[in-house]
Image (cartoon, rainbow, N blue to C red):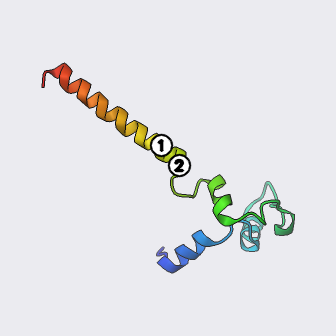
Amino acid sequence: MIIRPVALICAVAAHPVRQEIVDEIKLKATSWKPKEVNENHLRHIDVSKSMGHLGMTPFNEQAKFGVHTWKVIEKELKKITMKFKGH
């Protein structure tokens, strides 16, 4: 299956609470029913805010700090290893 870039961008930019998704779930799900869009309490939340709760945003500040911290730790461990090996 080939996904065209424009379609992918539109899919990512679309709000996660929309009729299209509800209809698809109704067709496929057998053990539960989705809430209707007008009943979903997340329908009015800005996509940029709601995506953060879904794990689809780029790194937030805490994640950036975590990555930076691990890089610093890795660098220091390499220094210790090199000293231990006598380099």
Number of numbered discs on residues: 2
- The spot of residue 39 in percent (x, y) is 87, 64
User: Disc 1 on helix, strand or loop?
Assistant: helix
For this rendering, which residue is in front, 44 or 34? 44
User: Disc 2 on helix, strand or loop?
Assistant: helix
- The spot of residue 3 in percent (x, y) is 49, 75
Q: Which mark is residue 61?
A: 2
For this rendering, which residue is in front, 60 or 39? 60
| Residue visible at 57% across and 58% down in the picture | 56
**What residue would you read off at disc 1?**
65
Kind of residue at badge 2:
Glu
Q: Based on the displayed image, in which of its 4 quarters is residue 31 positioned?
A: bottom right
- The spot of residue 27 in percent (x, y) is 75, 68
| Residue visible at 58% across and 69% down in the picture | 12
Q: Based on the displayed image, in which of its 4 quarters is residue 83 positioned?
A: top left
Q: Does residue 62 sit above or below 52 in this rendering?
A: above
Q: Are marks 2 and 1 in contact (CB under 8 Å)?
A: yes
Q: Does residue 67 sit above or below 16 in this rendering?
A: above
